[in-house]
Image: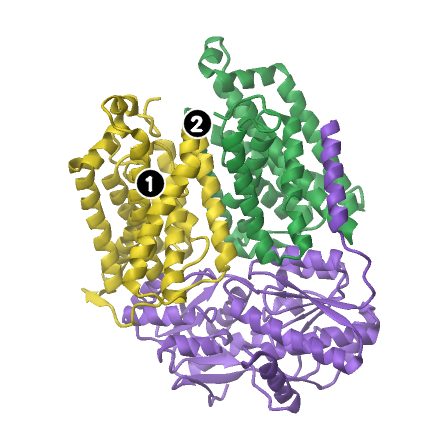
Amino acid sequence: MFEAYLIHLLILVVIYIILSISLQLSMGFTGLFNFGHIAFYCIGAYVSALLALNGYPFIICILAAGIIAAVFGLFLAFPTKKLKGDYLALATLGFSFVVYAVALNWVELTRGPLGLPGIPKPEILGFVFSDNLYFLILAGVIAIISYLVIKWIVSSPFGIVLESVRDDELASKTLGKNSFKAKAYALALSAFFAGIAGSLYASYITFIDPSSFTLLQLIPVLAIIIIGGLASLEGTIIAAIIIVLLPEPLRFIGFPSSVVGPARQIIYALLLLIILLFRPKGIKGKVELE
Amino acid sequence: MSLFLQLLVNGLIAGGIYALVASGFSLIYSTNKFVHFAHGSAVAASAYVLYLLFSMLGLEFFLSVFLVILFAGAFGLFMDKAIYSQLRARKASGLIMLIASIALLILFESLILLFFGADVKTINLIKVEKGLEFFGAIITPLQIVIIITSVVLLVLLFIFMKRTKLGKAMRAVSDNKDVAEIVGISSKRIFAWSFIIGSAVAGVAGILIGLEQNLEPTMGTNLMIKGFTGAIIGGIGSVPGAILGSFLLGLAENFGIWFLPSGYKDAIAFVILFAFLLFRPQGILGIKKVGDKSPGGDR
Amino acid sequence: MKKIILVFALVLVSLLLFGCTEQPKKIKVGALLPLTGSAASYGDTWEKALSIALDDFEADTNVSAEILFEDTQLRPELTVSAAQKLISLNKVTSIITGADTLVFLPITENNNVLVFTTASNPDITLKHKYVFRINPSDSEQGVDMARRIFELDFSSTAVMAFEGEYGRGLSSVFINEFSKKGKIVFSEYFSDTESDFRSILAKVKNSVADSLFVIALDNQYPAILRQMKEMDLNIKVFASETIHSDSVLTDSNGLADGINFFYYPQTDSNIRKDFETKYYTKYNSSPGPFADSIYDAGLLALYSDYFSDGNYLKAIDYLHSLTNWEGASGKLTFDSNGDPIGKYFQLYIISKDKFVLGDSNV
């Protein structure tokens, strides 16, 4: 019984790792305070779920999830071009509210609050990943690939451009770098991996509805990247493990889920406040949250 | 015709509710220059404390109201002292304050959920009877009180900011903190007062809204989003603007659902919020000032 | 890298310390109930009913059994994760539920877990396997209600229902049937936590509807009736079986008088009387809405496991072999889909703050 639960937790850790390192790409490395990240997670989950329910193979579902989410990321880059700081955060947050409202009200497509149940487990070349252990391996492989890709991006010349946009956009522009293009790509790539995470989430839980994609879901992701430290992929991974696993002992002590649910949010909110107050650089961050 | 009037009335009622939230929020924003999202939890906490004192413990109604307003002011002050002033001391940016305020909102909302439970609660004060009728539209006395209170608040806060010493000091800190300090105004004291007064207004909001609607743990977040939208529509740095913007939002929502299913009310609000943030962040009354750090102003 | 391994190891160790030990084999069934949240009043009485079922089963068979309760808060996503936990972690052989069933049926089907439910959406048994329903589905209630409204000479109705499996299911059947002879003026949906119905009621008032079919949770009816009165909306109201709750009578202050609705008929068998007595003795109150059906669901879940030794195919055979099985909610025989044969809805009318059996040709 205990191994089964541990596997379940590890799957969540893996999904959160993908979700948070993708946010690092736009927030930590490019300085774009994209509070709308959950919207891309949501879009990816719904795209993947709808395709899977209509019989498309998993590879198509997950890639489509990423690509369509990336398109939305690109699209969001235009109107938010000139925005900065808390103001960009609020505008992108507004975007995620709109996506939530669409998921809730476009009943013909998403079935609204009834959600999409019975999402099939991934199947690749005839092998169905119905056992959780195999799903964990699949998700883990996808996470490792995502990590390697993102690491490669940030170490490349393009990554240096991103960081220069974050640190001093004016200087970067003076040197002839097209900062808007960089920001747009960063948002799109960030959204792509969020979409991938959404696809994994939908296939694992086998049911999604709009309530899984609200402001509440942003808190742990935000906590992870701030606690892990902005622009630190390693820190993010450690923080993801801590954040997902930390509230779990409560469940083992025997508290009912009506206590564990809010308690988990309380822990995340407190951790976030503590880090902001005492160690804004996070565990391994190189950059001040600014 | 009477449907039009009823929707108009419903729009004013909703607008009044949002204005109650937006006014306190806007007062805090204009003085402190950051988005205090946790204001919503002051509203929710006040409603729940009223429920605790009046419905659970059975205290007399007006005594409960008095205690709730005291509590609300203290609650706001606590958030300022415990979190915001520490962050201010290390020159945290507006973004960090925003993140902290969101964390506080979620923290208190979860605490309410933990202690009061997820089910919906009602405060039963008013006897049920047919509302008053105006040309085919119905409105209850409590709803009239809500609308009047918002308008009164608009006037009172306006006078407060323009005529009283404290109000003027707040405006001075709002315009230019450093110059205000030179003149001898303690900005720390002013910040504290803005939280006390703004949150006390949230207390009034929580009481009225708690009586009019049911209490549920997520009410703080929902009301804050609507109040924030109203403030953005009217111009976030201005209290009268926030109140007017809130009424406009209430009307837009209720006329919007004339044609759309009622479930779209929130969707209408979100789209308006997003649109304003993108294209008209200074709001309808928007006044851009040089050196203004508010959204859309020069940085 | 070393740090990551260290953290991981620490976490593993702490989980091991808290981990569960090997349990002795005993009968385990799961229950997904709205213990908190908008439907908490139902969840509470259902939990009580199930604990009595457990007591009765253990007393009768001397076998130790366990019902594992999970709180769904009437939220589909919590229902799903709770179902997954009960199945993969706790390895229950069946799940008992009173609401939100469609969302987790794909999971139980894939894992050969039986489901016993009082939920009434028709698709539950029509489109899924291993489900046994204790009460007739809304494919009947919707039709009955449409006919009743015609019987009383109303022909244009507005429908307002709370969003979700139950609200959507019942309203679709009703709208389908009613549209054959009458006019559905409009249908709107609201959230299960909604408390302000004025915009919908304003639309009703402004429309040509001569009647209103309200499908809401018990704690929403008083608010709806109150707001109707405030708005001077005098229209004939019909309700769904969720109104059959004492709290509606006490909180409505007489406003509910005259409302027609359909509910499962109450038997006066000894089993039911025993159940009521035991419930009263243990909890000092009477069983709430559908508590009798949930009690039956609990007994069936436990006994089917007991008689089949946990083998799901044998359990299904056992259940289909039952003829007129005596439960607190009536006699049960299951058809091939898992729906109960011979159970039907009856008309009730609220009169002078009581639920009274109505007279009808429906």
**The quarter of the displayed image where residue B155 is located:** top left
**Rendered colour, chain C:** purple
Q: Nearer the viewer, residue C244 or B81?
A: B81
- Determine whether label 2 and label 1 are within 8 Å by CB: no
Q: Amino acid at mark 2?
A: Ala
Residue C192 percent coordinates (x, y)? 48, 62
Q: Which chain is yellow?
A: B
Residue C292 percent coordinates (x, y)? 61, 80
Q: Amino acid at mark 1?
A: Phe
In this rendering, do the residues under marks 2 and 1 share a single chain? yes
Whether residue A27 is visible: yes
**Rendered colour, chain A:** green
Whether residue A88 is visible: no
On residue B195, which mark appears?
Answer: 1
Give the residue at x 24% y 44%: B244
Question: In this rendering, is residue A53 above or below C226?
Answer: above
Residue C258 percent coordinates (x, y)? 38, 82
User: In the rendered structure, the residue with mark 2 lies on which chain?
Assistant: B
Question: In this rendering, is residue A274 above or below B12?
Answer: above
Give the residue at x 33% y 45%: B199
Give the residue at x 68% y 40%: A13
Q: Is residue C192 left or right of residue B140?
A: right
Name the residue beneath numbered marker 2: B92
Q: How many marks?
A: 2
